[in-house]
Image (cartoon, helix red, strand yellow):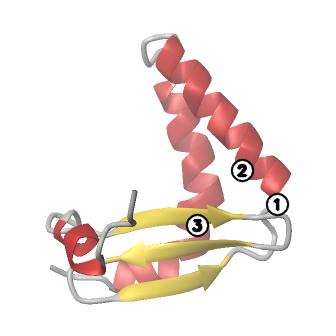
């Protein structure tokens, strides 16, 4: 299976930016995708262990039918939005 082309992914950002979290043992970064741009944002204080726990939290919430949505939103807000805020607040349609 081949990865999607950037132009295909950018189409998904028609209604607003999409944040893709990229995590590894060495570093974590966010890729903020818009119709016209991809911005790389280092997440220096985020670890692979924290991302793994976040994924488990999301999987658990999905298995529970979304009953922990507010906890997920709160966690994602702290993990991603606060760190990407400068770029996301400067974005406009």
Q: Which mark is residue 66?
A: none
Count of picture labels = 3
53 versus 59 height, above or below: below
**In x, y percent, where is residue 49?**
84, 49
Would you identify the image quadrant in which residue 11 lies?
bottom left
Numbered disc 2: secondary structure: helix
Residue 47's mark? 1
Q: In the current view of this chain or complex, which residue is farthest to the front? A: 1
Task: Estimate the x, y position of residue 6 in percent, counting from the top left.
Answer: 30, 78
Q: Are marks 1 and 2 in contact (CB under 8 Å)?
A: yes
Precedes in sequence: disc 1 or disc 3: 1
> Percent x, y for residue 4?
32, 67
Q: Is residue 36 above or below residue 45?
A: below
Question: The C terminus lies in which quarter of the figure?
Answer: bottom left
Looking at the image, residue 49 lies above or below residue 20: above
Between the C-alphas of marks 1 and 2, the distance is 6 Å
**Pointer 3 residue:** 82
Task: Give 84 or 9, whichever is nearer the viewer.
Answer: 9
- Tell me which residue sits at (39%, 66%) in the image: 3
Q: Give x and y (percent) for residue 47.
A: 82, 60
The residue indicated by pointer 2 is: 51
For marks 3 and 2, the one nearer the N-term is 2
């Amino acid at each position: 299976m081949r990865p999607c082309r950037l132009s295909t992914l950018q189409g998904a950002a028609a209604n607003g930016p999409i944040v893709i979290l990229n995590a590894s043992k060495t570093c974590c970064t966010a890729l903020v995708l818009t119709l016209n741009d991809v911005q790389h944002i280092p997440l220096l204080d985020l670890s692979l262990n924290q991302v793994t726990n976040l994924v488990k939290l999301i999987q658990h919430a999905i298995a529970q039918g979304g009953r922990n949505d507010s906890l997920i939103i709160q966690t994602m807000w702290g993990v991603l939005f606060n760190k990407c805020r400068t770029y996301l607040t400067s974005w406009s349609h």
